[in-house]
C-alpha cells in the first residue's frame, strides 16, 4: 500500500509539478496513473521511490514513512523507470546479479527466478551480451527482470509498456495481475487509455500536478456515462479544470 | 577554408568547454576561485624553486641552458601524455562527430578545428610548468626583452609538436583498428597502442642520439656556454631549438632557431591537416556500433556468475567494471595510473655506457640524507597521480543522467559513497605500487623506503579520493551527452589535479628545505594526512551524504 498525503514539489521555484497531492494506492489491485505529458506522473513516482525529495507532505509505503526509513521503503519497492538506459556497459546477467545483490536475494532464489524470467521474456540468448547491444524493448525487459528478481511487494512502473512487443506486453500484464491477486501493490503510469481500461482495477487521473479523478474503472465509467469512450472522458476530465 | 576551420574551432570551444560552473552557486564559485588562487601559484612556485635548485650547479659548468631545454622537454612530454588521451577522445569518441560528419566540411577542417581546441586546453598545462622555469631562468641569468618575447611565442607554439605527434599516432591506429565488432575493445587497444608507441619511439630516439662518445662529451662540457643543449636529444626536436632560441635570444643564432621553431610548427600543422584529409574519415565512420554475440547459452548456462555478494563489494566492482569497459574512462582514469610512473621517467630514461643518468640519480638518491626527500617525493607523486586520474573527482559526474538509479537502490548513500571511494582508492593505489616498482628497479631506491611508501602511501591517496569526491558532490557535471565530458571537460577533475599538485609541492618543499630525515618526514606527513583524512571522511559522512541526497535528478 502506498499513501501520499498532501505532497508538493516545485522545480526551480516556479514549475509546480506536484500540487497538494493526496492518493492512496491499496493492495490487491492494479492501479493506473493517467495523465497527459508533463502532468506530474514521473515526478510523483520519483518522490515515492526516493529519487526526489518532496518539498512538503508525507509518503508512506506499507505504512513506513520514506523520510524516516528510506532504505526499508526502497527495499520493498521494485521500480521500472521510463528510460531503461542504465548500466549499458554491463552484460544483462551482470545487471541482474547487481540488482539481486542490492536487494539481498539468495543465490538459490536468484538462479531459479533468473531461469524463469529469462525464459518467460525470451531473453535467454542475450543475457551474456552487453545491455548496450540491446534494442529499446530488450532493455525495458531486462529492467523489468531486474525488478522481478527481488520479488518486491510493491511494483512501481513508469510507462512500462512503451517499447514492448505485444507478446511481452501481454506477459507483463499477466504478471501484474498475478502479483496484485496475491494482495500486493501494483502502480503504473501510462497515457495510453486503452491499456488503463484493460488492465487497471482503479485509476487516478492527474493534470498539472493535481488529482482530477480517483476511483475504480466502473466508477469512472459511471461518472461519465457508460457509453462514452474513455478517451472522451479523459479529454473532458482534463479540460474541465480550465 | 581556413576560416571554416577557425569558425568550427570557436564553436567547438564554446559548445564543449562548459567546464561545469554554470549551474553552481556563488559560494561554490568563490570557493573554487580561492582554491585556484592558492593552488596554482604554489604549484608554480614549487617548479620555480626547483629551477633555482637545478640552475646553480649547472651554472658552475656553464650549462644552465639545459634547464630551459629540460623544461620545454618535460612540458612537451606532459602535453603529449595528456594530449594523446584528449586527441583520441576529441577526434574519435566525441558525440559531436556524429553531427559534424553530415555537414559539408572537409575532413581536414574537422581535424584542424579539433586540433586547435585541444591545443587551447593544453595551454593550461604548458603555462603551469613552463612559465615558472622560463621566468626563473630569465631573472637569474638577467635575460633581455627578446628572451621574453620569444618565450611567449614559443609557449604558444609549444603544444603543436607533441599534439601533432599524438594526433598522428591516433589517426593511424584508429584507421587500422576500426573493425566492425567489439568496438570498445578496439578503441581501448587502439588507445593503448598509440601510447606505447609514443613511449617506445621516444626511448628509441633518446637512446640513439645519446650515444655520445666520452671524449666528445667531456669536450662539450669543457666548452661550457650551454654547449650541451644541442646534444641533448628528444623526440620533440622543437624542445632543443626552442632552448637554443631562448638561450641565445640576444644574438642572430637565437633568431635563427626561433625562425626554425616557427617554420617547423607551421609545417607540422600543415602536414597534419593533409594526413587528416587522407585518413581521418576511415577511422571515424561507424565507431558507435557495438558488437554482440547472441549465442544461445541455454538454460544451464545461466549458472555462470550468479553468486550472491556483499552490497559494498558488488557496487565497488560495478564501478570498476564501468571504468574498465568504457573506453574514455579506461584511457583517462585507469591506464593513466599505470603509465604516469613511466611518463615521469621520460626525461631520465637516457642510458649510455658512459653517462648513465639513472645511475647518477640513484647515486644521489642513495646519499644517506636523501631518505626524507625520497619519501616526500613519493607522497608528492601519489598525490599527483591520484588527483590526475580523476576517478574520485568524476565519481558522481560519471553517473550523468542515470544518477537517479542510485537514488532508488536500497543502499544507503553513505555506503554508496564508500564504494565509490574504494574503487578510486584501489586504482590509485595500483599507481603507487607501479611507482614503487619503477623506483626500486630503475632508481635503486632502498627496498625499505619502497615498503614504507607502500604501507603509508594510501594516506595521501585517500585524501585525494575524499577531496575529489567531495568536490564532485558539490558541483557534479551530470548533463553530458558523451562520457568524455564527464571526465575530460570536467572542472572538478582539474581542481583535483591542482589540489594534488599544490599538496605535492607542500609535501616536497619543506622536506627539501629543512632536509628532513626519513623518520621526521614519515611522522610529519603521515600524521598530517591521517588528520586530514579523518577530517574529510567525517565531512563526507555528514555533509557529503546529505549533499548526495539533495542532488536533483
Ligand atoms: N528535473 C526537472 N527540472 C525542472 N522541471 C522538471 C523536472 N522534471 C520535471 N519537470 C517539470 O515537471 C512537470 C511534470 O513533469 P513529469 O515528468 O512528472 O510529467 P509526466 O506526467 O511524467 O509526463 P510524461 O507523460 O511526458 O512522461 C513538467 O512541467 C516538467 O517540465
Ligand atoms: Mg513521465
Image (cartoon, helix red, strand yellow):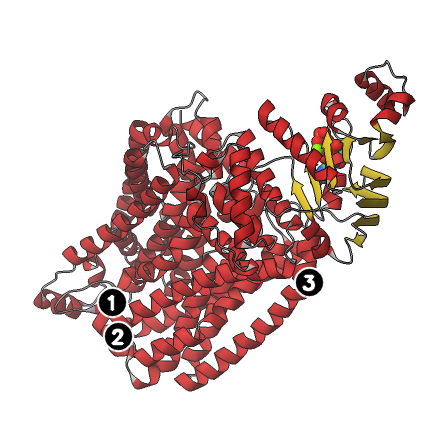
Q: Tell which subunit mark 1 falls on.
A: B
Whole-Å distance between the Cαs marked 3 and 1? 54 Å
- Whether residues under marks 2 and 3 lie with C-beta atoms below 8 angstroms apart, the answer is no
Number of residues whose C-alpha sits closer than 10 Å to that of mark 1, classed few (under 14), some (14–19) or many (20 or more) = many
Relative depth, front residue between B258 and A43: A43
| Secondary element type, mark 1 | loop
Relative depth, front residue between A115 and B248: A115
Asked if disc 3 is less than 8 Å from ligand 1, the answer is no
Q: Is residue B328 above or below residue A35?
A: below
Q: Tell which subunit mark 3 falls on.
A: B
Asked if disc 2 is less than 8 Å from ligand 1, the answer is no
| Secondary element type, mark 3 | helix
Q: Is residue A87 visible?
A: no
Which residue in the structure is indicated by mark 3?
Answer: B543
Q: Tell which subunit mark 2 falls on.
A: B
Number of residues whose C-alpha sits closer than 10 Å to that of mark 2, classed few (under 14), some (14–19) or many (20 or more) = some
Q: Position of residue A10 (x, y in %)?
A: 80, 42
Left or right of A127 in this view: A169: right
Which residue in the structure is indicated by mark 2?
Answer: B444
| Res A141 quadrant in image | top right
Farthest top residue in view: A227
Amino acid at each position: 500500500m502506498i499513501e501520499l498525503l498532501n505532497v508538493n514539489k516545485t522545480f526551480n521555484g516556479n514549475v509546480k509539478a506536484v500540487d497538494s497531492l493526496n492518493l492512496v494506492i491499496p493492495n490487491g489491485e492494479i492501479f493506473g496513473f493517467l495523465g497527459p505529458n508533463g502532468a506530474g506522473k514521473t515526478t510523483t513516482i520519483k518522490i515515492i521511490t526516493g529519487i526526489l525529495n518532496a518539498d512538503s507532505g508525507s509518503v508512506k509505503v506499507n505504512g513506513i514513512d520514506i523520510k524516516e526509513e528510506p532504505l526499508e521503503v526502497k527495499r520493498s519497492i521494485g521500480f521500472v523507470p521510463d528510460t531503461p538506459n542504465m548500466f549499458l556497459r554491463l552484460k544483462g546477467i551482470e545487471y541482474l546479479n547487481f540488482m539481486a545483490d542490492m536487494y539481498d536475494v539468495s543465490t538459490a532464489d536468484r538462479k531459479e527466478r533468473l531461469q524463469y524470467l529469462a525464459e518467460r521474456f525470451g531473453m535467454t540468448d542475450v543475457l551474456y551480451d552487453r545491455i548496450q547491444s540491446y534494442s529499446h524493448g530488450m532493455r525495458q525487459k531486462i529492467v523489468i527482470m531486474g525488478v522481478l528478481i527481488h520479488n518486491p511487494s510493491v511494483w512501481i512502473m513508469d510507462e512500462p509498456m512503451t517499447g514492448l512487443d505485444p507478446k511481452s506486453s501481454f506477459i507483463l500484464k499477466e504478471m501484474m495481475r498475478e502479483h496484485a491477486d496475491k494482495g500486493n501493490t501494483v502502480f503504473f503510469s501510462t497515457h495510453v487509455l486503452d491499456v488503463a481500461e484493460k488492465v487497471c482495477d482503479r485509476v487516478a487521473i492527474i493534470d498539472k500536478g493535481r488529482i482530477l479523478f480517483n476511483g475504480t474503472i466502473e466508477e469512472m465509467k459511471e461518472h461519465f456515462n457508460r457509453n462514452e469512450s474513455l478517451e472522451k472522458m479523459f479529454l473532458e476530465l482534463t479540460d474541465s479544470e480550465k | 577554408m581556413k576560416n571554416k576551420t577557425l569558425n568550427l574551432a570557436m564553436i567547438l570551444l564554446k559548445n564543449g568547454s562548459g567546464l561545469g560552473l554554470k549551474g553552481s552557486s556563488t559560494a561554490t564559485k568563490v570557493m573554487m576561485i580561492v582554491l585556484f588562487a592558492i593552488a596554482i601559484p604554489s604549484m608554480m612556485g614549487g617548479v620555480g624553486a626547483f629551477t633555482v635548485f637545478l640552475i646553480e650547479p649547472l651554472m658552475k659548468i656553464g650549462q644552465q641552458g639545459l634547464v630551459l631545454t629540460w623544461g620545454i622537454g618535460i612540458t612537451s612530454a606532459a602535453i603529449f601524455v595528456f594530449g594523446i588521451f584528449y586527441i583520441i577522445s576529441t577526434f574519435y569518441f566525441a558525440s559531436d562527430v556524429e553531427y559534424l560528419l553530415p555537414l559539408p566540411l572537409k575532413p581536414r577542417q574537422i581535424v584542424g578545428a579539433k586540433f586547435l581546441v585541444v591545443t587551447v586546453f593544453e595551454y593550461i598545462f604548458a603555462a603551469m610548468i613552463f612559465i615558472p622555469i622560463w621566468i626563473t631562468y630569465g631573472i637569474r641569468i638577467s635575460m633581455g626583452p627578446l628572451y621574453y618575447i620569444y618565450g611567449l611565442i614559443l609557449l604558444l607554439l609549444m603544444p603543436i609538436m607533441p599534439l601533432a605527434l599524438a594526433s598522428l599516432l591516433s589517426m593511424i591506429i584508429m584507421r587500422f583498428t576500426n573493425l566492425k565488432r567489439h568496438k570498445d575493445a578496439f578503441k581501448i587497444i587502439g588507445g593503448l597502442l598509440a601510447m606505447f608507441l609514443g613511449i617506445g619511439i621516444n626511448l628509441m630516439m633518446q637512446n640513439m642520439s645519446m650515444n655520445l662518445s666520452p671524449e666528445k662529451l667531456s669536450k662539450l662540457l669543457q666548452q661550457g656556454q650551454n654547449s650541451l643543449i644541442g646534444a641533448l636529444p628528444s623526440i620533440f626536436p622543437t624542445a632543443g631549438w626552442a632552448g637554443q632560441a631562448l638561450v641565445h635570444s640576444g644574438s642572430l643564432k637565437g633568431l635563427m632557431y626561433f625562425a626554425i621553431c616557427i617554420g617547423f610548427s607551421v609545417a607540422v600543422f600543415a602536414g597534419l591537416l593533409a594526413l587528416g584529409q587522407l585518413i581521418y574519415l576511415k577511422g571515424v565512420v561507424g565507431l558507435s556500433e557495438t558488437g554482440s554475440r547472441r549465442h544461445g547459452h541455454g538454460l544451464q548456462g545461466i549458472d555462470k556468475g550468479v553468486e550472491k555478494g556483499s552490497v559494498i563489494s558488488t557496487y565497488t566492482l560495478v564501478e570498476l567494471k564501468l571504468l574498465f569497459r568504457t573506453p574514455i574512462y579506461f584511457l583517462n582514469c585507469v591506464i593513466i595510473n599505470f603509465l604516469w610512473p613511466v611518463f615521469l621517467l621520460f626525461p631520465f630514461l637516457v642510458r649510455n655506457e658512459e653517462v648513465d643518468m639513472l645511475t647518477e640519480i640513484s647515486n644521489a638518491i642513495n646519499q644517506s640524507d636523501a631518505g626524507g626527500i625520497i619519501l616526500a617525493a613519493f607522497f608528492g607523486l601519489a598525490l599527483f597521480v591520484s588527483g590526475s586520474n580523476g576517478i574520485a573527482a568524476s565519481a558522481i559526474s560519471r553517473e550523468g543522467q542515470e544518477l537517479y538509479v542510485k537514488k532508488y537502490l536500497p543502499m544507503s548513500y553513505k555506503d554508496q559513497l564508500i564504494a565509490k571511494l574504494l574503487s578510486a582508492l584501489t586504482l590509485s593505489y595500483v599507481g603507487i605500487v607501479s611507482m614503487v616498482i619503477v623506483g626500486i628497479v630503475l632508481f635503486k631506491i632502498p627496498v625499505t623506503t619502497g615498503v614504507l611508501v607502500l604501507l603509508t602511501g594510501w594516506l595521501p591517496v585517500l585524501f585525494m579520493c575524499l577531496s575529489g569526491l567531495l568536490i564532485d558532490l558539490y558541483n557534479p557535471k551530470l548533463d553530458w551527452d558523451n562520457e568524455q565530458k564527464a571526465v575530460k571537460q570536467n572542472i572538478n577533475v582539474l581542481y583535483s589535479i591542482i589540489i594534488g599538485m599544490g599538496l605535492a609541492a607542500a609535501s616536497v618543499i619543506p622536506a627539501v628545505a629543512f632536509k628532513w630525515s626519513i623518520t621526521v618526514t614519515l611522522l610529519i606527513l603521515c600524521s598530517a594526512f591521517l588528520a586530514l583524512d579523518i577530517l574529510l571522511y567525517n565531512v563526507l559522512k555528514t555533509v557529503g551524504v546529505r549533499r548526495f541526497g539533495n542532488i536533483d535528478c
